[in-house]
Image: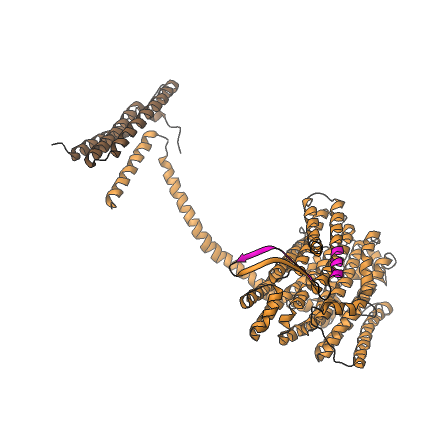
Chain colours: A orange, B brown
Amino acid sequence: MMEKLLYIALFSPLIGSLFAGIFATKPKLLITGVVTSALIGISMIASLMLLGYVDGVTTVNVKLFDWISAGSFDVGFGFVVDQVSVIMMVTVTVVSTAVHVYSIGYMEKDESFNRFFSYLSAFVFSMLILVMSDNFLGLFIGWEGVGLCSWMLIGFWYHKESASWAANEAFIMNRIADLGMLLGIFLIYWQTGSLKYSEVFGAVGSLAPATISLIAIFLFIGAMGKSAQFPLHTWLADAMEGPTPVSALIHAATMVTAGVYLLVRANPIYSFVPEVGAYIAALGAFVAIFAATMALVNNDLKRIIAYSTLSQLGYMFVAAGLGAYWIALFHLMTHAFFKSLLFLGAGNVMHAMEDELNIKKMGGLYESMKVTAILMVIASVALAGIYPFAGFFSKDKILEVAFNEGAYLIWFALLIGAALTAFYSFRLIMLVFFGEKNYEKYKIIPHEAHTYVLMALAPLGALAVVAGFFESGFEHFVTTLLPTYSFDIASFTAGLLIVGTLLVALSGIGFAIYIYRVKGGFPPSIKDRPCYKLLINQYYIPDIYKKYITDPFASFSFRAWKSIDQAIVDKSVDTIAMTLRNIGQKANKMQTGNLSIMLRWMVVGLVVLMILALIYRP
Amino acid sequence: MIGFTHYLIVAGILFSIGLVGILKRKNLLMLFFSTEILLNATNIGFVAASKYYGDLTGQLAAFFIIAVAASEVAVGLGLLVLWYKRTGSINLDSLQIMRG
């Protein structure tokens, strides 16, 4: 029975994808959107039933079939539904269902409507393979599957130069990281002789510490690519070229958190090497503050949210790196809800503004789109971490963990990050929904989205408000599989930390409201400040990559093409072909069509053969 | 005493005559005659070698060749007659439709 539920949860997105794929080149058919949404909904219901079924002792393990069986190498196509994967399944399917229904409205005027739903459902299927696989190879297949779907969806409007460029950038960046991941998987197989989670985690304790570190580092490199951690972070902001539902589903809620999932899943490996964990936490804290600063000055609606995602992923890595795996997973879940809500709200704003993304051209939209405004305020408050919204519980716990571990520098960085988060979230809200109606200058008449689109957002809005209260139940549920994390700090200190963080976040919000409500924004002279220039140019990192990596590589490739490929390889092949062709053209003259001449040539051949037979006789 | 070598010499001479006929003659009918000479030259060689080595396989091959030559001539002459009716000539140089 439960196995059937597992198969339903896993394969109904695939069926939806194939169904929509049949009509990929046809004009818009509403039915593809409805069918795929319904199938994802079925998958969500199955996941929720599995969530109710899985408890402390029961998990669902199935083996679909033998996959690779060569010599001692034996991998089955198996799936596991345990406390971690069921949480991921529920998160993924809940967000996907909302995004699918939302997309019916969002993509209604797009000519590739059917193709979009085919890709979107294929993504959900790959993501479910990723989280449900019971071995590293299956995880890798899902990992590559989501990468492929991400590429297809970022470049969905492939006729746009920038979109296909961004898609390729994302794909290539991930490829670099996936090499690390693949090396990690090879190393795991080489050292433990298995790829199944249960067997690997059982055997990993007996390995040399250096080997465990190496495995942990390689796997983390893979996670860095997928989760866009520094220095492989540039693709995430450029990935905003894709349709907004894609940004909400893939680049906020699910795919980019796959790296965190990998760390949480592989926690027995990381628990042996706390020094790697410390490095991960340090990098996470760095990214948390680094991305938040870039979000401060950006004027692109979606990019601000993308940087905020990057920053929140940093928070998750801090928690995972410091060994608080359940907190990382908890933040992953709450973040998925409120960040996808924020993105989908941004999609409504984009539609209302006729695809305008510059928040400086908006303002005062609250009057024309109240529901979207309220939902986005809820999401922003949750993101800023204000009680009692979801982000408060998860983000605050991460700060507590950092403090508890004595990593005060990380804690301080995260605290600054929390203030910045609150500020940029409300800068966005203020510039988009309140203040002067700048859009009137561009003769845009904004309109609210369809009712069913808003209805699709409502569950996410509700979850963004209440998800935090599941905390103790969540902890109890996942720590049957994940290690528990105990706090040593006194409850008074903890309370002080909570209040302090809350005050910092509130002051960030207050500052944003004060600046944009009372003072009407920063003076224009701020654009000449060096720090503003540094931030608006993303610390010049894209330029540095272009100047020192892509440009030299392109010129190297150009030279290799000219001097190796064309001058040596092509030339030798061409020479052989040309020689044969010339000989053929000369020999062609023998074929005069005159039988008498042909017979003479035949005799010549005969004589030559006889002479050869005479010379080379045995 | 006439021995194996003599037979081979006769076969060789016949073969050369046939070869020269193939090379020099432009008449299609003469070409058939030359081909027959060539085939019979090899037949002599086969039968002589068969007798010399005491192996019947050579004679078998000779019979085989005779049978093939007979059918070849039957078909070939049929085609030749047809060609003559069409063009009024059996000159080889008029047969040039297979230019490469």
Looking at the picture, tell me which residue is in the foreground, A212 or A105.
A212
The location of residue B1, given as percent across then percent down, is: 11, 32
The location of residue B84, given as percent across then percent down, is: 36, 19
Give yes or no for residue A357 being in the magenta stretch.
no
Give yes or no for residue A67 being in the magenta stretch.
yes
User: In the rendered image of this protein, does residue A22 appear above or below residue A238?
Assistant: above
Res A358 visible? no
Q: Is residue A176 left or right of residue A486?
A: left
The image quadrant that residue A47 belongs to is bottom right
* Quadrant holding the N terminus of chain A: bottom right
Res B64 visible? yes
**Please, which residue is most extreme toward the right here?**
A367
User: In the rendered image of this protein, does residue A455 appear above or below residue A263?
Assistant: above
Q: Is residue B83 left or right of residue A615?
A: right
The image quadrant that residue A424 belongs to is bottom right
The residue segment tinted magenta is A44-70
Question: What is the total number of numbered labels drawn onto the structure image?
Answer: 0
The location of residue A206, given as percent across then percent down, is: 57, 73
User: In the rendered image of this protein, does residue B15 appear above or below residue A575?
Assistant: above
Looking at the picture, tell me which residue is in the foreground, A222 or A94.
A94
The location of residue A288, given as percent across then percent down, is: 71, 71
Looking at the picture, tell me which residue is in the foreground, A125 or A614.
A125
Looking at the picture, tell me which residue is in the foreground, A521 or B12.
B12
Q: Residue at x 81, y 57 (%)?
A: A457
